[in-house]
Amino acid sequence: MTAIVYQINKKNGVTYAYESVSYWDREKKQSRAKRKCIGKVDPETKKIVPTHKKKVQAISRETKRGPIPITSIDRNFYGATYLFDRIGQNTGVTEDLKTCFPDNYRQILSIAYYLILEDKNSLSRFPRWAALHRHPHGAAIPSQRSSELFASITEEAKQRFFNLQGRRRVEKEYLAYDSTSISSYSKCIKQVRYGKNKDHDHLPQINLTLLFGQQSRLPFHYRKLAGNITDVKTLKKLLFDMNTLGYKKIKIVLDRGFYSASNINDLYKHHLKFLIASKVSLKFVRAHLDTVRDTMRNWNYYSQTHQLYAYTLPITWDYVQKRPYKGDTIKANRRMYLHLYHSPERALEEEKSFNNRMGKWQKELEREERNPDNEKYYAKYFEIKSTPVRGIKVVAKEDAIADAKRNYGYFVLLSNEVKDAVKAIEIYRNKDLVEKAFHNLKERLNLRRLAVSSEQSLDGKLFVQFIALIFLSYIKKKMQDNNLFQNYTMQEALDEFDVIECFEVPGQQLQVGEITKRQMDLYTKLGVTPPGSLQ
């Protein structure tokens, strides 16, 4: 069996083509291969330039529209990349990439496939992976070419892709919005700044925001921000982006880091439906809570499913809109629903944590080992007396302690659409899919530390990793819907597919290797027709 194999010379970075002939070694009783160099691959044309003036049919791997013709006999792993091909069709990702990046969408897909299958491996290993797998681009992408690819991904094309993907899901579901921080060692990225690091790394960072569909559980929009930008400041830009992209009738879910009176006014101004968490300590929240504190903890308001008390109050929001162009301010009342919750389990955990802190503060005072960071707590919760005979005496302020514990176990959500407290908590708790998506980005897609050489390369790399995240999110949803995580991890499921081979012969239909019943069942549960069923 003869095949063409590509390999990169690590010393000079040149990709060489080898004619590989398989044969059976009778002594060792195993299949072996003889390789003979027939030329090097031109980095521009992707054609084989013959060595020693030998006449060789040039095999072009140039990206073209339509299917890639089979030009050589080859055997590759195919099962996992076939799965990704079908997911790309189901989600419209392939079609939208082809529309926005007609010249290099196959390369983007191939690198995304690699990032998913080669967990945490660097892109320098892509040529080795490409030599063993059938994938959209069909050829190796050296490190230099991948950097050029990342730099070629323009902001205009990305926004167009977000628009196309968003139209497939927006207006049909609530959108979860959140942000994360990504540490960086790079000194050439302007947006790398010190800020509030959610991973507690003592490194400068950039921030990344992400929009997710709560029903589809698929991401469709992200933004890169300077590392010192806080969550509360990002919402206005998000609303501007949504307006620019033409999205209307948006429903958005936000955690309390995005709460501010200004942001609530902006959400009303743009006529968006929202569900947002806020602090119980807010003056208007405490005022309403005090009126129903005892009533809401009646059995009639207890949700056995969620094991908490849930109570809804229709309230009025004091809407304010400044109009600089007219020099006036609009003030009006807007309808809002205040959803109040009390979790007995959460109250116990918060009280236990508070008691531990109280014990620590008291010991610091009694041992005269005061911590400057805790001075405000000493003053708030303790009376300190000192006498020559008895020394230091520390007495707790019971009224202050009781006031602190009064709101333990309570939390609140605000909405201008959801009227039922139980439905509101169910919608809000689905928002954790964004946090899990950030975990996938950082851990599985190797985004824990940023090490890129330029701003353009960073933007392009983030986009390709975002594409990979769409595929991962699709697979994860299907696995959760079909209870597959009881028997597989994500990696185990992908490994199950990645052993399936395909055999390519010029002029013949692609042949797929043997597929077990277990693999066929797994394909079906992931919403994909097994490849053998297509023949």
Image (tube, grey):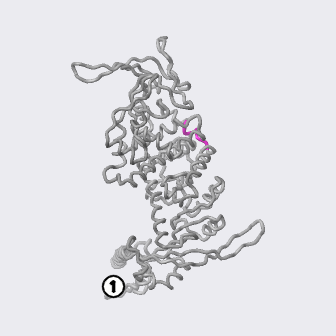
Q: Residue at x 45, y 41 (%)?
A: 84
In this picture, residue 77 sits left or right of residue 88: left
The x and y percentages for residue 117 are 40, 41
Q: Which residue lies under the disc numbered 1?
A: 391
- The amino acid type of the residue labelled 1 equals Gly
Q: Nearer the viewer, residue 297 or 257?
A: 297
Q: Where 217 falls versus 407 (above or below)?
A: above
The answer to if 402 sits in the magenta stretch is no
Q: Where 35 falls versus 215 (above or below)?
A: above
Instruction: Check disc 1: other Cα within 10 Å, few if <14, some if 14-19, many if 20+.
Output: few
Whether residue 417 is visible here, answered yes or no, is: yes
Q: Residue at x 23, y 22 (%)?
A: 29
How many circles with numbers are drawn on the protein? 1
Q: Residue at x 59, y 46 (%)?
A: 161
In this picture, residue 412 sits left or right of residue 357: right
The x and y percentages for residue 207 are 53, 55
Query: Image quarter for residue 358?
Result: bottom left
The x and y percentages for residue 191 are 57, 51
In this picture, residue 197 sits left or right of residue 165: left
Whether residue 364 is visible here, answered yes or no, is: no
Q: Quadrant of the N terminus?
A: top left
Q: Main secondary structure of the magenta part?
A: helix
Residue stretch in magenta = 149-154
